[in-house]
Amino acid sequence: MVQIAKAIDEAEELGPDYADLDATVAVDLVAANHILAHNGVLDSFGHVSIRDPRDARRYLQMQAIAPRDVTTADLITFDLDSNAINARGRPIYRERFIHGQIYKMRPDVSAVVHSHSPTVIPFSVTEKPLRAIFHNGHFLGQGTPVWEIRDDAGEQNNMLVLSNELGRSLAEKLGNGSVVLMRGHGNAVAGPDLKTTVFRAIYTEVNAKLQMQAVMLGGPINFLNEYEEKKSQNVDRPWHTWKKQVGAV
Amino acid sequence: MVQIAKAIDEAEELGPDYADLDATVAVDLVAANHILAHNGVLDSFGHVSIRDPRDARRYLQMQAIAPRDVTTADLITFDLDSNAINARGRPIYRERFIHGQIYKMRPDVSAVVHSHSPTVIPFSVTEKPLRAIFHNGHFLGQGTPVWEIRDDAGEQNNMLVLSNELGRSLAEKLGNGSVVLMRGHGNAVAGPDLKTTVFRAIYTEVNAKLQMQAVMLGGPINFLNEYEEKKSQNVDRPWHTWKKQVGAV
Amino acid sequence: MVQIAKAIDEAEELGPDYADLDATVAVDLVAANHILAHNGVLDSFGHVSIRDPRDARRYLQMQAIAPRDVTTADLITFDLDSNAINARGRPIYRERFIHGQIYKMRPDVSAVVHSHSPTVIPFSVTEKPLRAIFHNGHFLGQGTPVWEIRDDAGEQNNMLVLSNELGRSLAEKLGNGSVVLMRGHGNAVAGPDLKTTVFRAIYTEVNAKLQMQAVMLGGPINFLNEYEEKKSQNVDRPWHTWKKQVGAV
Amino acid sequence: MVQIAKAIDEAEELGPDYADLDATVAVDLVAANHILAHNGVLDSFGHVSIRDPRDARRYLQMQAIAPRDVTTADLITFDLDSNAINARGRPIYRERFIHGQIYKMRPDVSAVVHSHSPTVIPFSVTEKPLRAIFHNGHFLGQGTPVWEIRDDAGEQNNMLVLSNELGRSLAEKLGNGSVVLMRGHGNAVAGPDLKTTVFRAIYTEVNAKLQMQAVMLGGPINFLNEYEEKKSQNVDRPWHTWKKQVGAV
């Protein structure tokens, strides 16, 4: 909570790098980090980014600390090859290539979340696809793809997306979708703006819990059909109340 | 917590529309919203209503914000076709037709909850009926009906109850019962008064958790019989302590 | 938390009925109520009692309010037929006969808990017995009995233990054990003193969770044997830290 | 929280026994206890130790109270046969032999946790081995061994590691690994330093939850391979944010 209050104060003094950035953009990115931690999607790991509203060939992400601890002072700018423009010695997330490559391949995407969202992981190591089981999980469609790092890095890999090559492969697996699972690791979520992307990250976890329970009850499961998965979604209401929960309103 | 305290203060100044409404009625409706959010039945979505104690052809519901954030200042009156009488530009819940149509068809009902109560949803997309498995879930009886929106709106539907026609169909599926499940979406709960309805909404979720665990243990399951499901229920004690939990006593 | 602080102050002025009662006994009974609520064993319902240390033919229990709300001012004395000695118009728990009949049949028992402990209920409506699966659940032994109210009250029963006859039947099913399950309702836990009984009530729930997970993993399950179930148990350490958690130390 | 603040103050006055000990070592050991309690790995039971940085033939552990309640004033030194050097009448953990014997057999180990981490226990009484299912559980490798006390103490055992003989048997079962399960009881975790060991204790629980869910979804499960399980691990970030959570930074 205190971090957000501090963030709002600091927004007025974001420094020369961000003098031309709307301060609410920085505060919202801090809020997104805290909201995802508060809702159990991010633990000590994982990261959120937004495409830089001042330059579509760049993105903004925090320095590499735990999401629940970030403030606006942690803001760093990256190009789409994930080179840091103004890190100035601060640590950067090693798997930032996930973000850069998705922005490069998907002009429609303006925010990305990478998480180890817990109930999603079991779907990445078994064979039933994660699918839209209720209306708020509609964006998952008829099944989310699973990216297998062994296909690119071989059996002797270290499980992490540490290069633009691996990031590009992951972005290709995502395709035009909203969510891609990463086998034995986590997932990446993309959306047209920050609040929609946070909504999807949180409801991917909720949908996974519901689908697991439906499996437990015994099938067959009546999933959303191809029309239902296209329903419109109000994300303003949850975004507002989540911001209140972390003290950002 | 602070919202409730604020609610009680504001109750004294509910304004001209509610000058003839017992202030405790407004405070209880706020409390019901907060209690259902606190107990995980409502998240950012879902809504609670009461039949207007001043006019049985009307009902009262909050403006369309997250249940945990409502105060008595959010009160709006609707007729049973779910036209807002005094919205004055405030947003109203799009699925309010659920409420209006249940009140229209069920004179014995004075409160309705629509929620996405999480453990209940898996029962709406699989084939085992949700049934009374323990004494506090007695009102579920020998099985709750599941409403399938495709039966009315076809395959190309948007999952939501956005008209009086769909609301009436849902109310018909509810019949004389307490709870109706909505496939891939949530449920609607009805009762003779607000505290009983809140009790049922919370214990529908508890019963669903218990039934899911019983399935996991392996059947057969010894459900309540047709006499046991008619047991009387003390709802005053939980209502009082839930109000204390959200700061409304 | 505040209730306990209040309880300690009030202990000095328990009034003429309890002038000869060690004040720490009253405070511990309040703490037991709060601890069981804090640990999810009791919700708005359920009750705890102790045999009266001044007279083994009596027991002490709070007036009928939610366990998390009780203070020492709520103390009432009952005889073993569960007649209230000093209720003075205050409500009393309708199922108090569970307590009186267990004290009558088991001179070794000095505390009883009746709860709807959630994970225990599924074991009461399915066929696998709840058994000691880990050392801290040793007191469950080779399987806990399940009491079926239909055997005494017939199919047309109301699920509740509202008479000495039903209480005696339940106590007989408990036998010399620590825990008896009540079909579709909850359980009763007995022990030689309050802190041991609270320990058993909490670890019955923990053991039930572990056993359910073991079933999910797929059997066979290696339960504690008849020697292991007799291990000694340190209950002082958890009792002390639980009291700290609810502000009673 | 307050305990940690108190711990830091007291660190300056650890007394003559610890005048030559870096005060941050004592504070970190207190923090580890609180972190493991906060994350649900330790309840009222279980213990953490570190090899004494001043003398590799000794280890440091708190007096026998609940982990969430410890302060630096509770520090006690033990030799590797688990004789207390300076208990001065304070109670010591009865199962401390787990720690002494692991330090004796494993010069590479500088910290040990013994817990009843809940989701791990079901794996100790069933037949599927606990294995690395995601990258943060890599240290579990291709399967954790299960120690059966009956093999050493016979059927008539009391489930506890109350001697150096039993401790040595457990340490042998651990072998060169990170984690050993104890049938119907809990587990022991070893690591090269305190923060890595705390990380492993917490992520053993997380991995167990994920593996249980994967079993529920239905196999086959795609576990980490022998290369992936050797990935490097950043433990500084979680250690720092966990310390913040318990007020130790």
Image (cartoon, coloured by chain):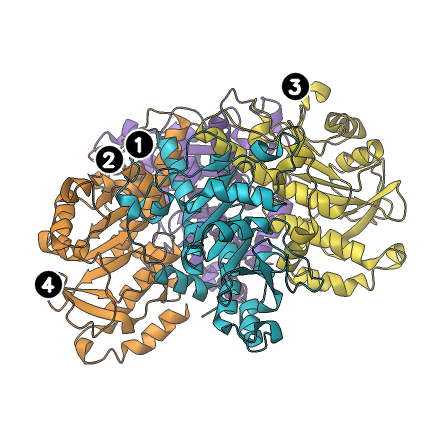
Chain colours: A purple, B yellow, C cyan, D orange
- Where is mark 3, residue-wise? B155
Residue C64 visible, this angle: yes
Q: Given the image, on which type of amino acid does mark 2 rest?
A: Asn
Q: Secondary structure at mark 3?
A: loop
Residue drawn at 66 percent across, 33 percent down: B229
Q: How far separated are the C-alphas under marks 1 and 2?
A: 7 Å
Q: Is residue D172 left or right of residue C26?
A: left
Residue mark closest to the camera, 3 vs 1:
3
Q: Secondary structure at mark 2?
A: loop
Where is residue B16 shown, x and y percent of the image? 89, 58
Dot 3: chain letter: B
Residue identifier under label 2: A157
> Residue A14 location, x and y as percent?
49, 63
Q: CA distance from mark 4 to mark 3?
A: 71 Å
How far across and down, in percent of the image, does residue B171 sit? 76, 29
Q: Nearer the viewer, mark 4 or mark 2?
A: 4
Residue situated in front as seen by the camera: A88 or D47? D47
Q: From the viewer's perspective, is the residue at label 1 or at label 4 nearer? A: 4
Q: Chain of mark 1?
A: A
Q: Secondary structure at mark 1?
A: loop
Bin the neighbour count of mark 1 within 10 Å (Cα to Cα): few under 14, some 14-19, many 20 and up: many
